[in-house]
Image (cartoon, rainbow, N blue to C red):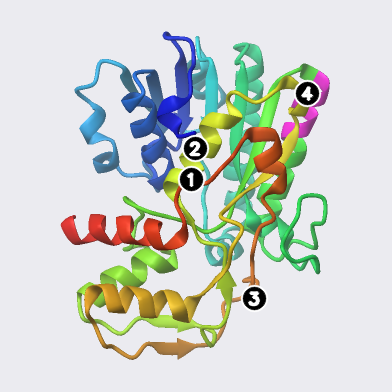
């Protein structure tokens, strides 16, 4: 079942926090395409206005420029909302190690503000972005909910903390919360220009510009790379999930792993480039391998990823070539 086949009541209003970001803008687009209303909340600190400019003429779209660190803004954004898709956060493991206090205020404080606002506004479902980073040094492979290790970065701590807060809101206040642990999402509108850019857009841009990309480590580290449309599907299906499973977290991935060097070679081949990468030392706080067990999401969210890695990469490469 694809997202266009999912049915909500016709006047449903979705709030997407971080809606001008990479994943957020893809969510806004999908919901508007389905004919529902979207309110986008973003302070444009990491999101970009150009990611949502194409929605401005749509009468079902509303943009609020605001910060989740401000509770009154969160309250205003949640007014009359049916479903909250909370994506707003500062990402990047290395950057979190440089700015621990800010990550606490933004990622944890901002999420608690959103949970509290959603509770007061009687939101039906609160779906939020967690991260595979919560698995840290877990010895269980593939990574499975309930078998988390020690967090290896400040960013991971903030996501782990958010899961606990969301569980408390489900337990004590009856707010239906669902945490989605994203594994290495990629796709259109992902920023290749940030110092902390994800590896796929970075490789694509550098190879298009005939630059030598850097691979941190020997290239054998693997990730469960997940095309953004699979993440969109998971968010929308979580909005239809049963009240009985509120407070739970789910791995959102492909359930597969790909080595960085193989990705590099696939992108090079598609772009018809033959450039030797630079190998550098591994990044602090990074894990060697990640692969998700997606059994729980399949069972309880009816999550069934439509895009395998090759299909997702092809769609992504097409988009970057044209943009």
Instruction: Name the spot of residue 74 as percent of width and height, x first.
Output: 53, 24
Instruction: Identify the residue position indicated by label 2 in the image.
Output: 233
- CA gap, disc 1 and disc 3: 24 Å
At horizontal 52% and vertical 30% (from top left) the residue drawn is 236
Do the residues bearing badges 2 and 4 touch, measured as CB atoms within 8 Å?
A: no
Instruction: Identify the residue position indicated by label 4 in the image.
Output: 244
Do the residues bearing badges 4 and 1 touch, measured as CB atoms within 8 Å?
A: no
At horizontal 64% and vertical 63% (from top left) the residue drawn is 291
> Image quadrant of residue 264?
bottom left
Q: As displayed, is residue 245 above or below residue 186?
A: above
Do the residues bearing badges 2 and 1 touch, measured as CB atoms within 8 Å?
A: yes
- CA gap, disc 4 and disc 1: 24 Å
From this viewpoint, is residue 228 visible? yes
Q: Nearer the viewer, mark 2 or mark 3?
A: 2
Q: Earlier in the sequence, mark 1 or mark 3?
A: 1
Q: As displayed, is residue 128 above or below residue 268?
A: above
Q: Is residue 153 magenta?
A: no
Instruction: Identify the residue position indicated by label 1 in the image.
Output: 230
- CA gap, disc 3 and disc 4: 35 Å
Instruction: Name the spot of residue 57 as percent of width and height, x first.
Output: 19, 23
At horizontal 37% and vertical 87% (from top left) the residue drawn is 277
Q: Earlier in the sequence, mark 4 or mark 1?
A: 1
Quadrant holding the C terminus: bottom left
Query: Label 2 crowding class (10 Å Cα cut-off): few <14, some 14-19, many 20+?
Result: many
- CA gap, disc 2 and disc 4: 20 Å
Instruction: Identify the residue position indicated by label 3 in the image.
Output: 288
């Amino acid at each position: 079942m694809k997202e266009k086949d999912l049915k909500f009541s016709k006047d449903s209003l979705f709030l997407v926090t971080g809606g001008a970001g990479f994943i957020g803008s893809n969510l806004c687009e999908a919901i508007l395409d389905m004919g529902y209303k979207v309110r986008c909340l973003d302070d444009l600190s990491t999101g970009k206005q150009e990611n949502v400019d194409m929605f401005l003429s749509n009468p079902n779209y509303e943009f609020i420029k605001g910060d989740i660190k401000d509770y009154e803004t969160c309250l205003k954004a949640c007014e009359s909302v049916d479903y909250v898709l909370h994506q707003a956060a500062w990402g990047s493991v290395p950057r979190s190690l440089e700015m621990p206090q800010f990550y606490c205020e933004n990622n944890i404080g901002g999420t608690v503000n959103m949970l509290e606002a959603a509770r007061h506004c009687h939101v039906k479902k609160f779906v939020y972005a967690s991260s595979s980073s919560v698995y840290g040094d877990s010895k269980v492979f593939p990574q499975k909910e309930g078998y988390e290790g020690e967090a290896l970065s400040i960013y991971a701590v903030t996501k782990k903390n958010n899961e606990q807060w969301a569980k408390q809101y489900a337990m004590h206040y009856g707010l239906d919360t669902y945490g989605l642990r994203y594994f290495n999402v990629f796709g259109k509108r992902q920023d290749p220009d940030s110092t902390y850019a994800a590896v796929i857009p970075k490789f694509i841009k550098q190879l298009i510009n005939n630059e030598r990309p850097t691979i941190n480590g020997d290239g054998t580290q693997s990730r469960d790379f997940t095309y953004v449309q699979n993440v969109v599907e998971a968010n929308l299906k979580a909005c239809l999930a049963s009240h009985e499973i509120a407070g739970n977290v789910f791995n959102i991935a492909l359930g597969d792993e790909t080595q960085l060097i193989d990705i590099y070679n696939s992108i090079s081949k598609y772009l018809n480039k033959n450039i030797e990468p630079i190998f550098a030392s591994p990044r602090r706080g990074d894990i060697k391998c990640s692969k998700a067990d997606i059994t729980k999401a399949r069972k309880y969210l009816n999550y069934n990823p439509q895009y395998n890695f090759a299909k997702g990469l092809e769609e992504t490469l097409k988009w970057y070539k044209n943009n």
